[in-house]
Image (cartoon, coloured by chain):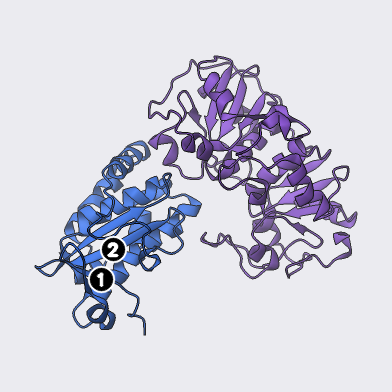
Amino acid sequence: MASSIDQRGYAHPDVLVSTDWVEQHLNDPKIRLIESNEDTLLYASGHVPGAVHVDWTSDLNDQIRRDYITREGFEALMARIGATPQTTVVFYGDKNNWWACYAFWVFQLFGHTNAKVMDGGRLKWEKEQRALTRDVPSYQSAQYKAAARKDAPIRAYRDDVFAHLKQEGQLVDVRSPEEYAGTRLHMPDYPNEGALRGGHIPGAKSVPWARAVNPEDGTFKTAAELKKLYCEDQKLSPAEPTIAYCRIGERSSHTWFALKYLLGFSNVRNYDGSWTEWGNLVNVPIEKGATPMSKAAG
Amino acid sequence: MGVPQLPDKLERLIETFEMFDPADRTSMLLSYADQFKEVPPAIATRPFPTSHQVPQCESDAYVWATRQPDGTLQLYFAVENPSGVSAKALAAILDKTLSGLPAAQIAAVGCDIVERIFRQNISMGKGMGLMAMVNAVQALAKAAMPGARGAQREGRESTAGDREITTSETSD
């Protein structure tokens, strides 16, 4: 059984809310619950009462370029879900909140800091046998004036990774050990979505993303457990700039969330180009094997 | 040789899916998931044997086939992951459209039907597992076809009185 959120020693415990908290705020007009899943049928099959669905592909990604929605797109999304800049959005979803954290991260590109994640996500809510409904709520369209998208503080592009590599900066590869080692090009049981080379960015430390959660209920591990995982076992320093990556930046947004908010890393960026970009770039450095070899590995 | 034809009921169902817009397709998939019936205790009880587990399926799906007195096959499924909505929908579709057919017709159904049924509802992690479910059904059907090596050896009487098919000895 997970301890209460404020007893776990997180740097910013206010970004997590419990299932109890959500249940107590189901009718709070200042709160908008947002479900984001990998399985597109799950929301329709039953969701937390009052929650809206935000789909990572159709709602958060640009439909032509490999990029996220524009400011106008974000404003339209917020209007659709009836959220103003003052609304506190609470994300939850399947797969240990993998996609919830991804949506949270995209919302931060637009500076919507009134944002939280429901600890444990769908798994915990379902295990606790709390209410689910198929009723799709309808909220009055809201006026939302978004700031220009600001990528730089939390998003790394390819050139940022090159610059980071030159400075021997900290990298966290959050994919499976097999993807990291280069023995497979995609997640176990997932299709190969196209990388020509296997391996990892030189010096990257391997910490598969799901190690940050308790598998039985999807809650985040305590700060002490996370510190051991990232700072002691992998010698990552919270004070040093850090870039996390995976395959397209979704699993690494989960790790980005854990490092930035739960452990208080001061400068963490998510490289959403990730392995589907790096593993296809011509003549970039790549390491193979189960452990980092380069000097940048420390 | 041309592509083997799908059994009529399955082809008609897929054609219906193809006419639907995404919202209607989602509703129809959910409606099938709601109709999902778990394998009866006469065929299998927990813990389900791993020999019937669908590999690569994160919904923890299981599949059985029994040969009925008229020679046709009856399919049964279990989906242990409570969030396995897609797996339940596919299981119900396969049961409703394939159970009661001769093994040879079921064996002609390939995993490409998953893409045709689910379209935008096929999420990254689900696709492989759903295709593996169809492959598992196909393997059982092949094992049940006349002359299949393992089927004759491995077929055994279930408590329901049917001949249960396994594929454990069928690979060369």
Chain that is coloured purple in the picture: A
Name the disc covering residue A26, or none: none
Amino acid at circle 1 = Ile
Q: The disc numbered 2 marks a residue on which chain?
A: B
Note whether A87 is above or below B30 in the view shown. above
Give the residue displayed 28% in from the left and 51% down from the top: B38
Q: Nearer the viewer, residue A124 or A279?
A: A124
Which sits earlier in the primary sequence, circle 2 or circle 1? 2
Q: Nearer the viewer, residue A214 or A191?
A: A214
Give the residue displayed 74% in from the left and 37% down from the top: A262
Is the C-beta separation of discs 2 and 1 under 8 Å?
Answer: yes
Amino acid at circle 2 = Trp
Q: Secondary structure at mark 1?
A: strand
Asked where in the image residue B157 lies, by quadrant, the reply is bottom left
Q: Can residue A110 be seen at all in this image of the molecule?
A: no
Asked where in the image residue B116 lies, by quadrant, the reply is bottom left
Give how far apart the Cα atoms at labels 2 and 1 are.
Answer: 7 Å
Q: The disc numbered 1 marks a residue on which chain?
A: B
Name the disc covering residue B165, or none: 1
**10 Å neighbourhood of mark 1: few (<14), some, or many (≥20)?**
many
Chain that is coloured blue in the picture: B
Mark 2 — residue? B64
